[in-house]
Amino acid sequence: MGLAYELKTGTILFTATGDVEHWSALDTLKAGLAAAAESPTPQGWHLLFDVSKSTENRDPNELRNIARAIAERRSALSGRCVVVAVDPLHYGLSRMFGVFMSGLGFEVHVCTDLGAAILWLNTSETG
């Protein structure tokens, strides 16, 4: 249980499972972002967070820490981020995370379905 990442066709997929400890997850997040920065894509990497199997309960300061860590690698990223959250708690926390990310120049979408998340990431920003 914890946070894992995978680089998949222009998207960094972060998957949270169980009760994810914040500081170890932040280390994994930074490792995933660094791996993506070493393999640049023309449009930059999209971010996809799947927290549908997570039991974590983040506080606002932890969400800000995550957003700041992502912003440090902004040059390697497309600016598009989607979060998959299925229960009301994680959906609400994901929306709060989206507000912090928006303040750092990212476009964030929260949804309840992985297929819809992938579709949103691959849809034109103007569409």
Image (cartoon, helix red, strand yellow):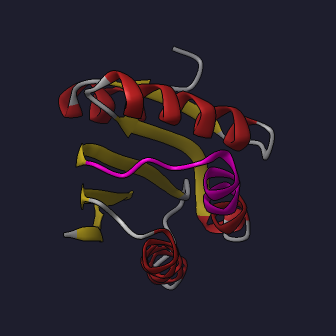
Query: Quick one: 36 or 113, which is closer to the camera?
Result: 113
Report the predominant secondary structure element of the magenta stretch.
Answer: helix
Relative to 55, residue 87 above or below:
above
- Residue at point 25% right, 27% down? 86
Looking at the picture, does residue 8 appear above or below residue 88? below
The percent position of residue 115, horizontal first and vertical second, equals: 19, 30
- Across and down, in percent, residue 8 comes to 26, 62
Vertical position of residue 29 compared to residue 56: above or below? below
Q: Residue at x 40, y 38 (%)?
A: 83
Pinpoint residue 25: horizontal percent, then vertical percent.
Answer: 43, 72
Total label count?
0
Q: Quadrant of the N terminus?
A: bottom left
- Front residue of 70/19: it is 19
Camera-nearest residue between 74 and 23: 23
- Residue 9 appearing in the image: no
- Asked whether, in this view, residue 67 is left or right of residue 122, the answer is right
Q: Quadrant of residue 7?
A: bottom left
Q: On the picture, is 37 further left or further right than 57?
A: right
Residue 96 location in percent, x, y?
A: 61, 32
Q: Closest to the observer: 11 or 91?
A: 91
Tell me the magenta residue range.
Answer: 55-67
Residue at the outermost top position: 127
Q: Residue at x 32, y 58 (%)?
A: 13
Whether residue 105 is visible to the viewer of this picture, yes or no, is yes
Q: Is residue 98 magenta?
A: no
State yes or no: residue 66 in magenta.
Answer: yes
Q: Is residue 71 left or right of residue 77?
A: right
